[in-house]
Image (cartoon, rainbow, N blue to C red):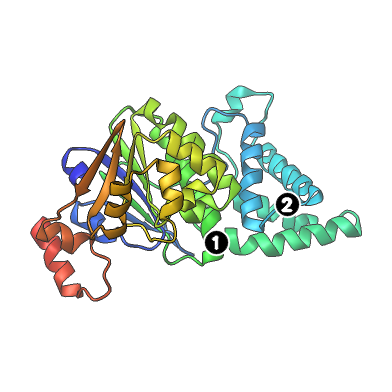
Amino acid sequence: MRSLLAGIRAIIIDPQGEYCGIAKAFGGQIIYIKRGCRETINPLELSGESPAERILWAQTLFSLMLGGLTGGQGEIITRALEAAYESKGVLNSDQQSWQLETPTLSAVLEIIAKWRKRGSNEERQACSFLYSRLWPHIHGSFMGNKTNVNLDKQVVCFSIAQMPDWMKPAAMFVIMEHVHKRMQTDKERKMLIIDEAWSLLRHEEHSAHIFELVKTARKFNLSVMLITQEAEDLLCTPAGKAVIANTAWKLLCRQDSAVIGGMREKFALSVQEQSFLLTAAPGEGLLFAMNERIPLKIIACEQEYALATTNPNETAGEKKQGWQNAK
C-alpha cells in the first residue's frame, strides 16, 4: 500500500484472494481467474519471438497441465501447435507473418480432437487421452481465447482462489509469463508480488521461470516480491537458492525452533538474531538490506490493518469501514 502511495504500480498474483480489498481501495482491477471469466490471456501470442520458440515454451505449459509429457504426447502437441500457427499463416520462415493474429489453445484442442479419428490406433488413443485431459484446462477457461487483459491500472490483482488446486500451476505459469512480457514494454516503476511462492517453487518449470524473472526484472524497472510462509521453501530448490542470492532485500519473520538451526547456517545468524526470530511478535522481523541486518517492527495504522488483515474473525463491516477510510 505504501509503494502504491509512492506512485509504484503493482501486479499481484493472489492464490487465496487476500489482496482484493487493497486493490478495490486503490481503484485497481481485480481479475478473477476462474472458469467462464471474461478476462482471457492467449498463451500462444508472439512477442517478437518465432513460432518455434513459442512452441518450445508451450511444451512446458502442456507439461504442467498434464503432470508431465511422454515423447509421443510431446510430438503430437508439437505438430498440433505447428498446424495451428500455419492455419493463421504464421510461419517460422516469414518474420513479417509473426505480426499476424496467432491461434488460440482452443484451436489447438480442436486439431487434436480431429486427429482422434485418423491415423494409427495408437495415435488415435494418444489424441483421445490428450483431448480428455486438456479439455478441462482449455475449454471455457481464461487461456482459451484471445487476450483482452488490461494491465494499465495502478493495481492489478489476479485472484485465482476460485480455481481448483490442480489447475493453479498452469494458470500461474501463464499469468507470470504474460506479466513478464508486458512489463518489459515500459520503464515505469512497478512491482510484481507473488504470494504463496512455495506453490510455484515445487514445480521445476516454475522455479526456472522465477529465477529468470528475478535475474532480468531490474533491466525494465520491475521489482519482484516473493512471499512464502517458510524460508525453507526457497532453500530446498536450486532456483530458490538462486533467488535468495539475487535478492537485495530479505525479511525473516518469526521462525519455529524446529527450523531455526537451518536458518542459522544458511543466513549466518548470530545467537542474538536467532533469539529475536524465535520470539518475534507479529510485524517484527530481521531485515537483510544489502550488507546490513536490521531488527524491524512494522506498524500498520488502523486503516491499513483493516485493509490487510486476513484474520477470519475480522468482520466484513470492519473491512468495509477500512476501505471507506482509505478512500
Instruction: State the residue in front, 215 or 56.
Output: 215
Image position of 223 (left or right of 63): left
Q: Is residue 117 visible?
A: no
Query: From what the image shows, is residue 45 above or below residue 107?
Result: above
Under circle 2, the secondary element is loop
Quadrant containing the C terminus is: bottom left
Q: Residue at x 60, y 50 (%)?
A: 105
Q: How many marks?
A: 2
Residue type, numbered disc 2: Leu
Q: Quadrant of residue 57?
A: top right
Q: Is residue 51 visible?
A: yes
Dot 1 corresponds to which residue? 167
Q: Of the numbered discs in the image, which one, if any, rests on residue 294?
A: none
Q: Residue pushed farthest right?
A: 120
Q: Residues within 10 Å of mark 1 (few under 14, many from 20)?
A: some
Instruction: State the residue in front, 303 or 121.
Output: 303
Q: Position of residue 285 (x, y in %)?
A: 26, 50
Q: Position of residue 73 (x, y in %)?
A: 77, 51
Dot 2 corresponds to which residue? 69
Image position of 189 (left or right of 35): left
Image position of 80 (left or right of 190): right
Q: Report, in whole angstroms, how far the alpha carbon at label 1 lies from the one at label 2.
A: 16 Å
Q: Are marks 1 and 2 in contact (CB under 8 Å)?
A: no
Under circle 1, the secondary element is helix
Q: Position of residue 30 (x, y in %)?
A: 32, 56
Residue type, numbered disc 1: Met
Instruction: State the residue in front, 324 or 291.
Output: 291
Q: Residue at x 19, y 61 (%)?
A: 307
Query: From what the image shows, is residue 43 above or below residue 114?
Result: above
Q: Residue pushed farthest front?
A: 271
Q: Position of residue 143 (x, y in %)?
A: 52, 53
Image position of 183 (left or right of 59): left
